[in-house]
Amino acid sequence: MKFAFAGIDFLGGVFDALIETGWTPIKLFTRPCDGLYDHNEAVVAQARRHRVPMQLSRLKVADLDALAQVHGRDWALVVAGYPWLVTGWQGRAAYALNVHPSPLPVGRGPYPLFRAIADGHERWGVTAHVLGEAGFDTGDILARDHFPLTPADTHETLLAKCQMAARRIALGPVARELPARWRAAEPQGEGSYWARVTDADRTLDFRAGVDAVLRRVRAFGTIETIARLGDGRVYVAQAEGWHEAHRHTPGTIVNRYRRQVVVAARDGYVQILRWSPVAASDVGQIGR
């Protein structure tokens, strides 16, 4: 099967897996990345290895027309980790599908991984679905891969689990069973859309208690949460904590040792281990 891939390294394993099973890439649609949170080096290298054209600008109907003129309709558009809504593929490609890192219809939206941990979900998954015209992540379901979450999971472990699940879906249901899956695709029904997170979502609330604070730290991992300490704020990448009765006001700094800071929470203490006064996304930008 010929296919065009739209995405970045986040779910780039789908691109690799399809090639491994014998699918032939014909174009890569990707986007500019910051090299910190978003990367596309791997998918770009794969495209160069197979000498297929690449496009950084948004995929539009004219681009699908151009592919159809060269390859007819006998090809698939595979989307995974692509930020823009893609429409107009009908009549230009035989198949168009999206691989989304949530157990749809729960968790539609740009990046549901943070909330999956912050909300304490016990199971998660990845879904392949028909690329719909009505909105993001709403098309009929082609395949699912579910897995458990544990209280110890972090953003990074969940990301790895999603990447591995996406690769399994690509290797099996998509690469080897797509026509049959396409005919048997199941409507999603009612679901939930999770908007892009804001700084408010990333901010730690020490009034909520130790468990809630640490769960939010795990939910964002190296993407960092925000802690307001006194009149300033710091960006937190790692923290630990314990339960203990005390009379400190939540948010009070009660101990400092080198770069470690202990902050009172409602029902104990949170020890901030890795933090910075500058967000990781701003490192190297000061003075420019």
Image (tube, helix red, strand yellow):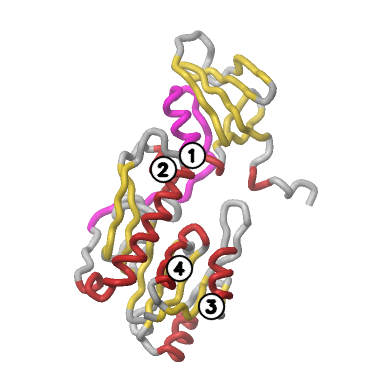
**Which residue bears the numbered disc 2?**
115
Please indicate whether residue 113 sits to the left or right of residue 230 in the image. Answer: left
Residue 119 sits inside the magenta stretch: no
Q: Are marks 2 and 1 in contact (CB under 8 Å)?
A: yes
Nearest to the observer: residue 189 or residue 51: 51
Nearest to the observer: residue 78 or residue 161: 161
- Residue count near mark 2 (Cα–Cα under 10 Å), binned few <14, some 14–19, many ≥20: many
Instruction: Select label 4 or label 3 by which is in front.
Output: 3
| Residue 81 location (% of width, % of height) | 46, 61
Instruction: Select label 2 or label 1 by which is in front.
Output: 2
* First of labels 3, 2 by sequence position: 3
Residues in magenta? 189-218
- Could you give the CA–CA distance between mark 4 and mark 1, rounded to whole angstroms? 32 Å
Instruction: Select label 3 or label 1 by which is in front.
Output: 3
Q: What residue lies at 59% left-to-right and 63% top-to-bottom?
A: 41
Q: What residue lies at 56% left-to-right and 23% top-to-bottom?
A: 271
Q: What residue lies at 64% left-to-right and 44% top-to-bottom?
A: 280
- For residue 9, the mark is none
* First of labels 3, 1 by sequence position: 3
- Could you give the CA–CA distance between mark 2 and mark 1, rounded to whole angstroms? 9 Å
* First of labels 2, 4 by sequence position: 4
Q: What residue lies at 25% left-to-right and 72% top-to-bottom?
A: 182
**Which residue bears the numbered disc 3?**
50
Q: Secondary structure at mark 4?
A: helix
**Which residue bears the numbered disc 1?**
201
Looking at the rendered structure, the kind of residue marked 1 is Asp
Quadrant housing residue 223:
top right
Q: Secondary structure at mark 1?
A: helix
In this picture, is 278 found above or below 179? Answer: above
**Which residue bears the numbered disc 4?**
15
- Could you give the CA–CA distance between mark 2 and mark 4, rounded to whole angstroms? 26 Å
